[in-house]
């Protein structure tokens, strides 16, 4: 029997994925463990390995089309297995485009994408299921108006019109080829990651009413602490902590007292997270990725510095899993090292807030009636007003200032 | 007469269904001396429904033969004549009587070509007036076409218009295999455009009688005509029905049905034969098995004959088979409510 190659589930809440690129073509010989295709989830791009050694056949899945988890996308024929064995899965699938006439020897063609992910117990017409499948839509979110609540084509279409996000995501599929214009412009289709970033951030700006609170915070004490920590970490063999790590540590500590900032929107509800998972916005080859310091609330600074270094390295080597790149409860974006004074960040949905950090620079400030120079940094908290109110965000900023200006208070 | 005028006459010439069948018989007999007609009262009487008419006077008693009342005998004679090189066209006076000829049609005519590896073939045509609506009760009103569509080796046609009645009969006479043509008794008097020349309508190709986008209605014989009339009424209610006239139920033109359903997403199959185990079941299953399944937005609905012998009482007789009103109601419900 040929071995099925399915679209794997690489993330907890993954229901569909798209194949971003095939590394093999029809009939190629593959060895177990070879990379055969790349899939994109709503968080990352992953390579998928061949489950067996043999010839790859019946590659069915098209690039860029959302496919339900578990759907067979190709078959591997083991050595000695004829490509025309009766068990050949859906041999006629390639001809699916045209209705085929039925004769004694020719069975009707099977659908290209199996109905593997039909949510069971749900009443929906085959056409409704098909449209939902093609658009990566979860039929459970669609209300049916047909007999006994059956979902029909009209229900799915109405649902999609009400949620233009789906349509936008479809339109964001890459053009078939980059085309050059006479002026020498270059048209670069979105990479998988760029598409994910574009979709998620557009969604965030569209659905989350952002508001921004900025505080200028004196960094003298934090700097001193970082200096002392660097020496101590050297002694204990931990990586030198960066300002980002210190800010993450401080944020993780004070988020305990601000559950509404460590929260997410979920439909028409607020989810208050038990754990504090802090995402750190990073750049890789021009792409924005956000690895997560998992359970940051329970880490001391050396542990956090080690985890931060591990994520950085994993990101550079592209060994991070989608699980390590998603699911944060709060995000920090630090552009200070690029000389940015201050900025506002877009919330990483469905999180409720993101902290944008500018550079630390000596500024004249008033202290005891005198103008003195102090290292100052600008912190801007973007909050989703659906779940965070101004005063709640302001209280967080008060605690952030206090913690950064007097870090020993946290100990 | 100038040729343009001739063309014009051809264009507007109308014949009844019965006249069209007769014209096809006459043209076939003129063109090929192997063609002959036989059956009960097809000669001097002109046929129980007047189809053969004056053919006996034009071609003589040798070629238009009145037979004894023995369907098995006629069918056996036709099979023998066909194997030995003739082109017999046999009329079963009422299609109901074909039960008496089953052995020859099913066990002999259908199988001989296969059993002799193609060395013998059976180029015979059986014409069978069928269907209800004439007050002829249970033994003279049946629609038995599905019985024969179940038999490999037989072709089963159900032309619905005078044009197709002529063209399909000529195609059937040409065909080297046994072909059964079910002619609906209520259609014999219907009129339509029929070209004068001897033309052929291909066997196994359905006709799209009306294009539409909301629901596909498939029927054959008189049901295709009723579906057309129903579609006209549905259009006034804002429902766009596509009507497919099967014309041939074996071989069946599945491609045309599938393409239509792919477009309309809804299928209503209408047939006069008993609904249970009938043609509608076959068409429904073909669609459900095919990749077109994924384009269905509602259950497939069958409208078929009642599970009962055709009653004599005219009210009950009408109620026993799908009528135009039934088609309109079923199609409208299918489109609006997603059920029949």
Image: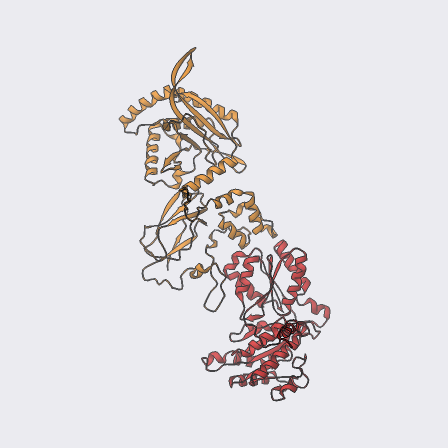
Tell which residue pokes out farthest to the top in this image. A369
User: Dividing the image into 4 quarters, which one contains the N terminus of chain A?
Assistant: bottom left
Q: Is residue A382 left or right of B311 when viewed as pictured?
A: left
Q: How is the image coloured?
A: by chain
Q: Where A2 sits versus B9, above or below?
A: above
In the picture, one chain is red; tell me its letter.
Answer: B
The single residue placed furthest to the front in the displayed view is B2
* Residue B82 seen anywhere in this rendered image of the structure: yes
Relative height, residue A398 to residue A93 (above, below): above
Instruction: Identify whether A258 is placed above or below B304.
Output: above
Q: Position of residue B187 (x, y in %)?
A: 66, 72
x and y percent of residue B133 in the render?
69, 71
Residue A130 drawn at (x, y percent): 51, 53
Q: Is residue A76 left or right of residue B7?
A: left
User: Which chain is assigned orange?
Assistant: A
Q: Position of residue A206 (x, y in %)?
A: 52, 36
The residue lying toward the viewer, choosing from A397 and A336, is A336
Is any part of residue B306 visible from this angle?
A: no
Instruction: Please determine whether, in this image, residue B251 is positioned above or below residue A351.
Output: below
């Amino acid at each position: 029997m040929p071995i099925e190659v399915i679209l794997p589930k690489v993330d907890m809440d993954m229901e569909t994925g798209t194949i971003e690129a095939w590394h093999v073509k029809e009939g190629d010989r593959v060895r177990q463990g070879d990379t055969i295709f790349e899939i994109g989830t709503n968080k990352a791009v992953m390579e998928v390995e061949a489950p067996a050694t043999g010839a790859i056949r019946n590659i069915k899945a098209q690039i860029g089309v959302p496919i339900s988890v578990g759907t067979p996308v190709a078959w591997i024929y083991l050595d000695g297995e004829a490509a025309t064995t009766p068990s050949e899965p859906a041999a006629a699938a390639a001809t699916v485009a045209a209705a085929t006439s039925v004769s004694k020897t020719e069975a009707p063609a099977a659908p290209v994408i199996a109905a593997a992910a039909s949510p069971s117990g749900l009443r929906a017409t085959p056409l409704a299921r098909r449209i939902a499948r093609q658009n990566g839509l979860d039929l459970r979110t669609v209300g049916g108006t047909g007999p006994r609540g059956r979902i029909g084509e009209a229900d799915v279409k109405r649902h999609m019109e009400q949620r233009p996000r789906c349509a936008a995501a479809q339109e964001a599929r890459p053009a078939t080829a980059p085309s050059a214009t006479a002026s020498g412009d270059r048209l670069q289709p979105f990479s998988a990651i760029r598409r994910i970033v574009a979709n998620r951030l557009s969604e965030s700006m569209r659905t989350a009413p952002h508001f921004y609170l900025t505080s200028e915070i004196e960094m003298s004490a934090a700097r001193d602490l970082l200096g002392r920590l660097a020496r101590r970490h050297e002694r204990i063999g931990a990586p030198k902590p960066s300002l980002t790590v210190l800010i993450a540590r401080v944020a993780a500590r004070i988020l305990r007292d601000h559950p509404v900032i460590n929260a997410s929107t979920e439909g028409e509800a607020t989810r208050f997270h038990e754990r504090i998972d802090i995402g750190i916005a990073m750049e890789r080859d021009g792409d924005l990725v956000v690895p997560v310091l998992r359970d940051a609330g329970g880490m001391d600074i050396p542990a956090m510095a080690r985890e931060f270094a591990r994520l950085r390295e994993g990101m550079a080597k592209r060994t991070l899993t989608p699980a390590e790149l998603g699911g944060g409860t709060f995000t920090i974006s630090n552009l200070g090292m690029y000389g940015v004074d201050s900025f506002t960040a877009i919330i990483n949905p469905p999180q409720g807030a993101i902290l944008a950090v500018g550079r630390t620079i000596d500024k004249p400030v008033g202290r005891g009636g005198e103008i003195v120079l102090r290292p100052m940094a600008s912190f801007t908290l973007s909050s989703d007003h659906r779940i965070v109110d101004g005063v709640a965000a302001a209280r967080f900023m008060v605690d952030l200032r206090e913690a950064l200006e007097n870090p020993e208070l946290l100990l | 007469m100038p040729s343009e005028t001739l063309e014009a006459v051809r264009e507007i010439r109308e014949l009844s269904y019965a006249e069209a069948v007769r014209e096809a018989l006459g043209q076939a007999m003129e063109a090929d001396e192997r063609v002959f007609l036989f059956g009960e009262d097809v000669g001097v009487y002109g046929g129980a429904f007047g189809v053969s008419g004056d053919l006996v006077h034009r071609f003589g008693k040798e070629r238009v033969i009145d037979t004894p009342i023995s369907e098995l005998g006629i069918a056996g004679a036709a099979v023998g004549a066909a194997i030995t090189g003739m082109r017999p066209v046999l009329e079963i006076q009422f299609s109901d009587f074909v039960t008496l000829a089953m052995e020859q049609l099913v066990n002999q005519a259908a199988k001989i070509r296969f059993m002799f590896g193609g060395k013998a073939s059976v180029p015979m045509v059986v014409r069978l007036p069928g269907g209800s609506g004439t007050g002829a009760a249970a033994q003279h009103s049946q629609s038995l076409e599905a019985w024969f569509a179940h038999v490999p080796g037989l072709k089963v046609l159900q032309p619905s218009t005078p044009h197709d009645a002529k063209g399909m009969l000529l195609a059937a006479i040409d065909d080297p295999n046994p072909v059964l043509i079910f002619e609906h008794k209520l259609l014999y008097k219907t009129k339509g455009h029929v070209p004068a020349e001897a033309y052929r309508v291909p066997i196994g190709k359905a006709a799209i009688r009306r294009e539409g986008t909301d629901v596909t209605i498939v029927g054959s014989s008189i049901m295709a005509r009723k579906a057309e009339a129903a579609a006209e009424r549905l259009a006034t209610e804002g429902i766009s029905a596509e009507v497919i006239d099967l014309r041939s139920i074996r071989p069946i033109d599945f491609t045309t049905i599938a393409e239509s359903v792919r477009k309309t997403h809804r299928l209503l199959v209408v047939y006069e034969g008993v609904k249970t185990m009938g043609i509608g079941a076959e068409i429904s299953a073909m669609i459900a098995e095919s990749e077109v399944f994924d384009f269905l937005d509602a259950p497939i609905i069958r409208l078929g004959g009642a599970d009962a012998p055709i009653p004599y009482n005219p009210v009950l007789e009408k109620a026993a088979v799908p009528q135009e009103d039934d088609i309109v109601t079923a199609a409208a419900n299918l489109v609006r409510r997603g059920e029949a």
